[in-house]
Amino acid sequence: MKIGISRSLFYFKRPVFFEEFLKNLNCEIIFSPETNKLILEEGTKISDPETCYSIKVFFGHLLYLDKKCDYIFLPLLKKNEYGFEYCPKFFGLPDLAKNILKTKILSAFLEGDLEKFAFQIGKKLKKEKTKIKEAYLKALSSEREDGEKKFFSFREKMKSPLKKILLISHPYNLYDSFVNLRIKERLEKLNLQPLFLQDLPYEILREREIKSVPKFHWEFGEEMIKKLDFVLKEEKNIDGVIEISSFACGCDAVLKEYIEMMVKSFEIPFLYLILDEQTGEAGFQTRLEAFADSL
Amino acid sequence: MPIVCKNMEKITFPRIGNYTALLKIFLQEIGFEVVLPEKTTAKVIFEGSKNSPEMFCFPFKVNMGSYLSALEKGARKIFMVTASCGSCRLRYYAQVSQKILKEKDLPVEFIIFDQNFFDIIKKLNQLTKKSSLKILTLILLFLKEIRFIEKIERIGFFLRPREIDKGKTDKVLDEFFLKLEKINSLKELRKAKKDILEKLSQIPYEKKRVPVVGIVGEIYTVIDPEVNFHVERKLGELGLEVHRDLNLSYHLLKKIFFTDFFIQRKVSSYLKSTVGGHGRDAIFEMLKYSKKNFSGVVQLLPFSCMPEVTVRPILLKIHQKTGIPFLSLSFDEQTAQAGLETRLEAFADVVKNYFEKKEFK
């Protein structure tokens, strides 16, 4: 059975888990390619003009996968296991995708209970219960391994003698190098060490309490704020912070206010970049260079 | 005259359409000294968007502008009702505006209410030291008056496309709402109510069938005619009767009777889960309108409003399926009157064609 996974948006929330889980259930997985210009154009054409850049990219990926597989994997992410909500735009994705796709959608609610979610998916693929359980546990352990690896590499990068720039954004902006206009390479060329905030594990930072910032009900808001607080207070030697946000992202409008406040209270240079389908590379490069000079 | 508690700081609240004056009377009755938020003019919008985060939604910027003008007039406390259980940005309105005003060094205190009656009564009780029973009766009275405002608006919607001397209804209504802002007690309100009903009944109108247009969308843009640049009035002038179910009372009753479950069942073939805000209600209302004898649906939303933007493709799908004319208008501080009018005129032509075709059948 062929299952298509679009390599954008929700996939980056749990890349290892989704992939490993379906693989362990003996499904053949077709990935959409990394975002390219064609995908972006197709996505922009079909999606609502006022929706955020990331959703436009996502629909491009879905259109690529259409008719190439038996099912398209598109879960309805509502709450993560700590009870925090995903972006409200995620809630409508399967229903919107249903309107434009000819391929069937493999979907299930994720409302806090990851195991229940896994069983629902497995049931729809007509797999046995013991097998689903096995696949779920395996996927979970490899996700944990991956998290540790990322954390380790983050620690390694912290030791680097270069000036360190912390990149804050949603995972689908950070790990998609087309969307963020290869910001990692650009920074490396400018002799800076980029660090992804997303590489930090959330589990160990759960208990932190931050008084100056309201408690966010969005999982990414909660994670970003606590991770940033950890980096600013414990790691200390950060030379600059860049926040990337996709145009018309409603949640970032709120988060940016507080992230900027936190960073500025430590007197660290802060750059806020908004990306959309019309962002020019030249202007982007100029702003990065100017920022690098200000450090 | 209501007894005003001494040593109490002046309060203000975000403007909310034609209900603003009512809310003022109600708060004065409870015993607060109120600064009435200024009308949403171009200046208020400009000041608001200058001081708000760039990517925040339009209602926030309008609220910000009205706070700033009220603070100039001496208000020191801001009442704000937020959705502490919703999924969208409304949840952080109070916190973010508090932060911005604090950074500007303005002496202001926020009193944040939850969208639930117990919380509102409890907090009002603490602030005024009045018995909960009295506050409760006042709230119930307030709810009754809300229904009256909606009734007046409904009569306006009915009269506008039918009136014989054009513009008469608007003149009467404008006068009434202006008068309402100057009223300070429930007694005067009762008199004004009688007066307006009499005046409206004297407006001569033709008895004819006109196409009816339903309005769906985000609560603040739908309710406040100053934020949606008087779309309802313009539609009326173009010869269309407007119908609006998403009133304040609709949302308040929904909170009391938990009709969300019922609505979800109705829309589940289009949308399986809530998308925050009132996205689900928009689909529900549009389905209802398309089944009834309506000739068009208008969706009003602030630019990049998360729930409404998410459901818009679904509304478009209903439009394609049923053929009912559909227009989606998004508003922000850069919306121009002329462009809006052109779109509405074109839409009115489509609606009239659709209506005539249906009548002909």
Image (cartoon, helix red, strand yellow):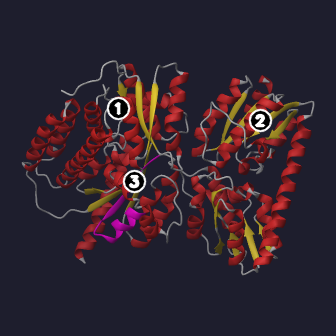
User: What kind of residue is marked 1?
Assistant: Thr
Is residue B186 something one can see in this rendering? yes
Residue A230 is tagged as: 2
Chain ID, mark 1 = B
Indicate the position of residue B47 as horizontal and vertical percent values.
44, 27
Q: Tell me the residue that label 3 is attached to.
A: B255
Secondary element type, mark 3: helix
Say which amino acid is labelled 2: Phe
First in residue order: circle 3 vs circle 1:
1
Measuring 84% from the left and 28% from the top, which residue is drawn there? Answer: A237
Label 1 neighbour load within 10 Å: few <14, some 14-19, many 20+:
few
Residue B143 drawn above or below residue A101: above
* Tag 3: amino acid: Lys
Residue B289 shown in magenta: yes
Residue B336 visible in the snapshot: no
x, y (%) of residue B131? 31, 36
Read off the residue under disc 1. Answer: B41
Residue B103 spot, x, y in % from top left? 55, 22
Badge 2, how many Cα within 10 Å: few under 14, some, many 20+? some
Contact (Cβ within 8 Å) of mark 1 with mark 2 = no
Instruction: Give the distance between the C-alpha atoms of the residues marked 3 and 1, in whole angstroms.
Output: 31 Å
